Image: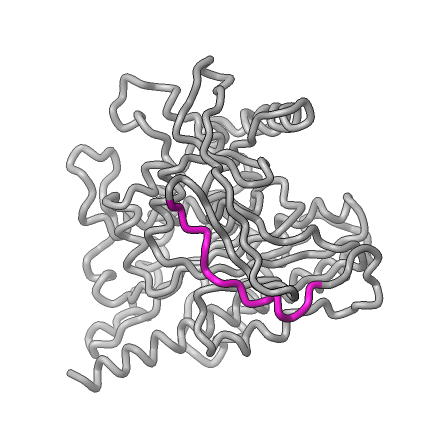
Amino acid sequence: MHAGPNDFNKMAAVLHSRYKNENHIVFQSKNNKSGQTHVGIEQLGIWFAEEVVACLRQHDMQLRGIKSGKKHLFSFLGHSLGGLIVRHSLALLYGEDLPIDYPFRTIFDQRYRDILEPTSFFTLSCPHLGCRRNNGGIKRSAWRASIHAFLKFFGKTGTQMRLADHLKNRSVKIEDTCILQRMAEPDSPFMHALCKFKFRTVLATTHHDVSVPFCSGSIRTVNPYPEASRGKPDFRIVGYSNFDRDYERVFERHLQFEAHSDVVIGPPIGEQSIRVHEGDVLKNDSAVYRYVSEEGIVSYGSDLKGTEFDETAGEQLEHYMHDEKRQMTFLTDMVSNLHKLSWRRIDVEFRFRDHLEQLFVHILPIGSTKNLTHTKVLRELSMAGARCVDAGVSMLELDHKKMLQSMMQEETQL
């Protein structure tokens, strides 16, 4: 919500370098910058969709592979709020099933749908489940009050992140449910558009991300990972799921910290804990998540469903649930609906020396360090962010290779 057009510069540079010998377009949104992101996800999605169409028209000659029957791969990367903006914009770009009374129109030319192949949808530290904090106890309630007060500075978008937008205008039918809940409804144009992409991936940071807690970023109800150790800023992948074996060589070089001698607190997790088995399936209103540890299979299970009091409306709200650490609250059906799609997950850990360095954890997955000027710390954090960017871009690169192979196989069968 306080991003800028240059935040993706490092990731864009890596993408350009990987595809320098191929015909490609890397587009970075410029409309959804700090100061313009308070108007709500709907308007932000419209602006982004219009930017995408404008970009395609600008490169129209480059995209005219339709004459030879050639298709172009079409992928989206979204960081933080940007992931939700992309999800909403996809309903406009691919929204042939939009309701007649829906207030936004489809703006994607059919010609582009014919020549662009939806390939990879990839979010990094995106609040898919919102940013609503959980009540309970003095400390937790005070933290919730401070986070929610901060979100109120971001206007309609902040209200939507608190899952409170459905309380603002009950006379309008489309506002009966919050926007994130509507975007997760199985028969919605938002979910239908997501289904068009062959690969759907979420990357989330296990700890210290105040803006987007792990469960929201990874669409889970449980965080099975111990808290990150202290030491020189570094990065590693601690878990991944739903990837086939071809991706193991992409991730294997990032499974350990580069400099183990700097660890101050806590032992590193062994390699056996890397491969995460898909779980977190809602069943009988409970969530169970399994992961492999050095001791074997460990299971977490508890009834996480609850009722909470909404401070803005002064009423009890049912159908909510919280993660096992009670860091945040989200809607039960929103989680279960999103789980009806298959998601690939990358769980990453950033290591820091102190709390000041931890402030950068939210932007490191895209290699950004904002306005940090301390040379040594900047270099260390940049190297940690660069490793995360390398992992993400390498995954995306392999997605494209696999998609091209699949398309070639389909052509030979015709």
Q: In this view, does 232 lie to the left or right of 13?
A: right
Say which residue appears at 75% left-offset and 55% top-offset.
Answer: 229
**Between 34 and 88, which is closer to the camera in this rendering?**
88
* Above or below 10: residue 395: below
Which residue sits at x=48%, y=48%?
220
Q: How is the image coloured?
A: one colour
Q: Nearer the viewer, residue 206 or 92?
A: 206
Tell me which corner region of the image, top left, top right, bottom left or bottom right, holds residue 365. Answer: bottom right
Q: Where is residue 141 drawn, in percent x and y?
A: 62, 24
Q: Residue farthest to the top?
A: 314
Residue 183 locus on image (x, y percent): 34, 41
326 left or right of 284 in image: right
The C terminus lies in quadrant: bottom left
Q: Is most of the magenta stretch helix, strand or loop?
A: loop
Q: Can residue 80 be seen in this view?
A: no
Looking at the image, which is closer to me, 31 or 369? 369
Q: Tell me: residue 256, above or below residue 356.
A: below
> Residue 65 at x, y = what percent?
26, 74
Image coordinates for residue 300, horizontal then vertical, percent: 54, 50
Q: Give the range drawn in magenta.
A: 269-283
The question of residue 271 being in magenta is answered with yes
| Residue at position x 57%, y 43% in the image | 213
| Total count of labels | 0
Query: Residue at image x 77%, y 61%?
Result: 267
Residue 226 is one of the magenta-drawn residues: no
Q: Can residue 87 be seen in this view?
A: yes
**Residue most toward the bottom?**
412
Whether 146 is drawn above or below 23: the answer is: above
Identify the image quadrant of residue 116. Answer: bottom left
